[in-house]
Amino acid sequence: MTISQPSTAIADSPESRFDRIRTTFGFIAAPGAMIILLLVPLPITNHQQMLTALMAFVFIAWITEPISIPVTSLLALGLAVLLGIPEVDASAGESVEKFVYSAFSSSTIFLVIGGFILARAMTVHGLDKRFALFVLSIPGVARSTLRVAIAFGLIAALISAFVSNSAAAAMLLPIGVGIVRALGPELKELTGIENPGRTRFATMVMLMIAYGASVGGLLTPIGSTANVVGLGFLEQQVGVSVGFVDWFLMTAPLSAALFVLMCAVLYLFNRPETRKLPGAHAYIREQKAQLGAMSKGEANTVIAFGLGVVLWIGPSILAESTLGKGPLAWFTSIDIGTAAILAASLLFVLPVSWQNREFTLSWQQAVKIDWGTIILVGTGLVLGALMDNTGLAEVVGVAVVDGLGLQGTISVTILSVVLAIVISEMASNTAAVGVVAPIIIPIATAVGMDPTLPVLAAIFGASCGFMLPVSTPPNAIVYGSGMVPILRMFRTGIVFDIVASFVIAGGVLITVNFSTLS
């Protein structure tokens, strides 16, 4: 369902003007910063200076988006090779090209690809919409404005744990808009407001979808590309691998706490005009009836997704058992990237109609996944590897620690969360992790702490861009409905950003058990 607005309103909106200023600034600032940093003498090695210039270009371009983020990422790879940034030993068969492009062989890349293909199958066959309507049809949910809004937030959170935050918000948007519009006469009678889209109830439903998708994305490693990028940095730069179960055990308490506080903040600033919605249940029942019985494609998608869950969770569960150390040792060695690829591959062999040789997912359907994000993930891994290779990571860490006077775990963790949240308000959450993680790892090392903690804090904090439509794709999606006034989003979002920063910093410091990470 497409929500349209007058073109003149879009062209003249504050968000459009802000975007034009931001991109224009980026066109000048990104290459300008790189040229200046290449020419001005710095007290570091030549390789470090070239990498500093490249990272300045990439970070500014990621935040301001003068060109699309994937194009910036591709350009960064080419520039890294052209400038000869990595220090390699040619006599040992190493080459600049091999070093730069080797990051794309990481299992992290294949985790993204497999996860995207599984999510694509859910969207193609409508499995995500069926799940949403199932939850909304639970007796009692649709009769209360508050319960309806919370249900949308819960559905968005659960779906975005396995599907991209953007896809979760885009799928729920037409259902939310449909409920608000279908209840228009009833809302008008109860509240006296002519346009149901201008009610606080409508705003609360829309923001529940957007914020719920962002909060739910924390639950699993595949819930957000920011998670995947951060895990890639941990694996390559810190040597720490986080399993599916370990990740869930870490993030479940944080996500639950954030969800409860999200509901409280949204209710406080967008309290619905009425508590009862007698007509909502009939609308949801009608929508559910239109879906009919579960299709063969939906059933096959459930099977493939179930295999993925087994392969993600099983190795962690069996790792310490007798079976895991004996006859099933091969099973415990399956990493989350391999699991995602195996599960996704099953979609191409499970038939929907064997007679017509029609399978659950065709390559023409699968190819529509977000390849740009995959390039972004690989580029982030490349930049992290270059910082380690050239020694720039250590230089940055020592400089920041000395400059800010950081002395311990708490201060570095708080810095990590705050930086991630601030950057995610101006750029994508994935870009926020890509900017913060390479910086925070050497800082943590310089103060003598395990960098795993602040990197995790940055990953979690990057999902907390709640103030503006440009902060996250879910925010932009629900803002496009016309049911979310910009000032109300800003007021609600800034409070939730502050609340979330305390919860994440405190939660990470208290609940993360590093003994489960290896």
Image (cartoon, rainbow, N blue to C red):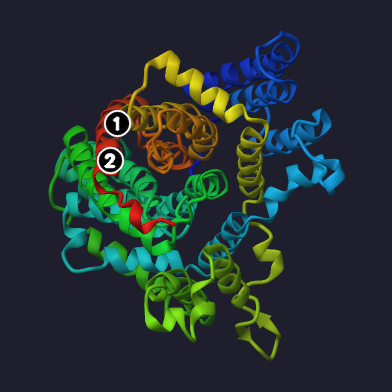
Labels 2 & 1 near each other (Cβ < 8 A): yes
Residue 509 is tagged as 2
Secondary structure at numbered mark 1: helix
Q: Quadrant of the C terminus?
A: bottom left
Task: Give x and y (percent) for residue 408.
Answer: 32, 28
Task: Give x and y (percent) for residue 425.
Answer: 44, 29
The residue under label 2 is which amino acid type? Leu
Query: Residue pushed farthest bottom?
Result: 355
Residue 154 visible in the snapshot: yes
Image quadrant of residue 422?
A: top left
Residue drawn at 72 percent across, 18 percent down = 31
Residue 410 is tagged as 1
Secondary structure at numbered mark 2: helix
The one of 198 and 370 positioned closer to us in this rendering: 370
* Precedes in sequence: disc 2 or disc 1: 1
The one of 191 and 275 positioned closer to us in this rendering: 275
Mark-to-mark CA distance, 2 and 1: 7 Å
Residue 182 visible in the snapshot: no
The image shows residue 473, relative to residue 113, as above or below, that is above
Query: Residue pushed farthest top?
Result: 40
The one of 64 and 94 positioned closer to us in this rendering: 94
Residue drawn at 54 percent across, 46 percent down = 229
